[in-house]
Image (spheres, rainbow, N blue to C red):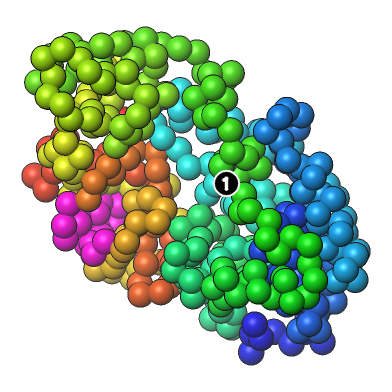
C-alpha cells in the first residue's frame, strides 16, 4: 500500500471515491490505516429515477461504511457533465454504427476530470479510487501498472486519464486479489463485505441494453446479409448490434441455413446492411491489422516511429503481440503477430510494455495484412 514517493503524514487530504461497494470500502479502510487524512465522496451521476437506478441504496451503504471507518462523507452529482461529456458522445457513436466504450470516457472526463476539480475545491491534494490497477509515482512521472489480480485488472479503462490527474491518484486495492478485499471487509465489520459487484455501463448500471438504447436512438431497419450477399432478414438498426454478437439476430431456424449460430461480422454503413456469418472464426471476423486515432500517452511517448509492444483491443482480452507505427498527428497503424477476433471500430486499443499501461486510442478501421479493408471502406 505504501508508496515510497508519498508520505501519509505530509500528503495532505485524500478524497476517496465511495461507491457503496466493497472495493471502495476497503480502499478507504486501507488509506485510513496507512495514516492518511481522509474524506469520502459519493457521486451520483445518472439522474433517471427508475427501477434500475441503485444510487439511493448505494449512498446509504457508503454512509454506513464511512461512519464505521470514521471519516466524513460528501455527496455530489456530475449528472450534467456526464450527459454532456460522456453520454452525448456515447449516443453519437452508436448512431453512427460504431461500438463505443463509455467507461473509458467516464474515467477521463468524470472520475479523473470533473471529480478532480471538485476535489481541489474541497482542499484535497490527492484522489483515491477503488480501481484494480496500480500507480507508481516518481519525479520522472507517474506510471500506470496492471493490477496484481489479472482477472480484475482495470488498467484498460484508465489508459485515457490525463497524466496530470494520474500524478494525483492513488489505487489502494490494486495490489490485492478480490477474495482478499472481501476478507478484509469482513474482518473489519464492514456491512458490504458480501455485496455483489456492480456491472453495466458506468453510472447507468445494469439494464436491458437494447431497450435502454431505444429510448435515445431510433430504429433504422435494413437488410441482414450473408458474406456472399444473400438476403437473410431485416435488422432494426446498425446501432443495436456489435461485431461478434451472436444473440438477438432473429435468424435461428431459417429454412435452408446450416444448423449453426450466426455472428455479426461487419456493418456496411453506406447501405445500412448488417453482414453475418456462421462461424466464430470466419475470416470476416478476424483481422491482423488496424488503425487507431485519438492516441493518448500516459507517461512516455515513443521516441521512434516503429516499436514492438502488446495491445488489447477489448477488455478481458489477453495481451496481443504487435508492431506499432506512429502516423501523422495522433494516429497509428497496428500490425498483430496473430489475427484477432472481432476488432471493432469505436472500441479502444490499449498498449502495454509488460505490466505497464502506456496509453491507447480509438480503433478507426480494421484490415487484412494486405491493408485491404475486410468488408469495405464503409465498414464500421
Q: Position of residue 90 (x, y in %)?
A: 53, 33
**In the rendered image of this protein, does residue 80 appear above or below residue 275?**
below
Q: Judge from the rendering whether residue 53 lies leftward or rightward of residue 371; answer left or right.
A: right
Q: Position of residue 321 (x, y in %)?
A: 23, 64
Looking at the image, which is closer to me, 186 or 27? 186
Q: Position of residue 193 (x, y in %)?
A: 71, 64
Q: Quadrant of residue 221?
A: top left
Looking at the image, which is closer to me, 320 or 53? 53
Q: Quadrant of residue 78?
A: top right
Q: Residue furthest bottom?
A: 4
Residue 296, can we see it?
Answer: yes
Q: Position of residue 190 (x, y in %)?
A: 78, 67
Highlighted range, magenta? 320-339
Q: Judge from the rendering whether residue 298 lies leftward or rightward of residue 137; answer left or right.
A: left
For residue 293: magenta? no
Helix, strand or loop at mark 1: loop
**In the rendered image of this protein, does residue 375 appear above or below residue 181?**
above
Q: Main secondary structure of the magenta part?
A: strand
Residue 127, can we see it?
Answer: no
Question: What residue sits 34% from the left and 38% below the top?
Answer: 345
Question: What residue sits 45% from the left and 28% below the top?
Answer: 94
Question: What residue sits 59% from the left and 18% below the top?
Answer: 215
Q: Quadrant of the N terminus?
A: bottom right
Q: How many marks?
A: 1
Looking at the image, which is closer to me, 178 or 15? 178
- Mark 1, Cα crowd under 10 Å, few <14 / some 14-19 / many 20+, is few
Q: Which residue is mark 1?
A: 199
Amino acid at each position: 500500500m505504501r508508496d515510497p514517493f508519498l508520505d501519509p503524514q505530509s500528503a495532505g487530504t485524500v478524497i476517496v471515491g465511495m461507491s457503496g461497494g466493497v472495493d471502495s470500502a476497503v480502499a478507504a479502510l486501507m488509506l485510513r490505516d496507512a495514516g492518511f487524512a481522509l474524506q469520502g465522496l459519493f457521486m451520483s451521476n445518472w439522474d433517471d429515477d427508475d427501477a434500475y437506478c441503485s444510487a439511493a441504496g448505494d449512498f446509504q451503504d457508503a454512509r454506513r461504511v464511512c461512519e464505521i471507518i470514521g471519516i466524513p462523507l460528501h455527496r455530489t452529482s456530475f449528472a450534467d457533465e456526464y450527459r454532456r461529456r460522456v453520454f452525448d458522445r456515447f449516443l453519437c457513436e452508436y448512431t453512427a454504427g460504431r461500438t463505443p466504450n463509455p467507461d473509458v470516457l467516464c474515467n477521463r472526463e468524470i472520475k479523473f476530470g470533473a471529480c478532480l476539480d471538485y476535489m481541489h475545491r474541497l482542499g484535497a491534494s490527492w484522489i483515491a479510487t477503488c480501481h484494480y490497477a496500480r500507480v507508481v509515482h516518481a519525479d520522472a512521472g507517474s506510471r500506470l501498472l496492471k493490477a496484481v489480480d489479472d482477472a480484475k485488472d482495470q488498467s484498460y479503462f484508465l489508459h485515457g486519464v490525463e497524466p496530470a490527474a494520474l500524478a494525483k491518484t492513488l489505487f489502494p486495492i490494486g495490489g490485492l486479489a478480490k477474495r482478499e478485499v472481501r476478507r478484509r471487509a469482513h474482518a473489519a465489520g464492514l456491512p458490504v463485505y458480501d455485496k455483489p459487484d456492480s456491472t453495466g455501463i458506468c453510472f447507468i448500471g445494469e439494464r436491458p441494453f437494447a431497450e435502454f438504447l431505444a429510448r435515445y436512438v431510433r430504429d433504422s431497419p435494413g437488410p441482414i446479409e450473408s458474406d456472399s450477399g444473400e438476403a437473410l432478414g431485416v435488422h432494426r438498426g446498425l446501432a443495436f448490434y456489435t461485431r461478434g454478437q451472436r444473440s438477438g439476430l432473429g435468424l435461428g431456424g431459417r429454412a435452408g441455413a446450416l444448423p449453426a449460430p450466426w455472428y455479426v461480422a461487419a456493418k456496411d454503413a453506406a447501405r445500412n446492411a448488417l453482414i453475418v456469418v456462421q462461424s466464430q472464426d470466419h475470416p470476416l471476423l478476424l483481422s491482423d491489422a488496424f488503425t487507431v486515432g485519438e492516441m493518448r500517452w500516459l507517461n512516455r511517448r515513443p521516441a521512434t516511429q516503429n516499436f514492438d509492444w502488446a495491445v488489447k483491443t477489448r477488455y478481458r482480452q489477453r495481451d496481443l503481440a504487435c508492431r506499432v507505427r506512429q502516423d501523422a498527428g495522433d494516429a497509428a497503424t497496428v500490425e498483430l503477430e496473430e489475427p484477432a477476433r472481432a476488432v471493432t471500430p469505436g472500441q479502444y486499443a490499449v498498449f502495454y510494455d509488460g505490466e505497464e499501461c502506456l496509453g491507447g486510442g480509438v480503433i478507426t478501421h480494421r484490415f487484412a495484412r494486405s491493408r485491404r479493408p475486410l468488408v469495405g471502406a464503409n465498414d464500421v
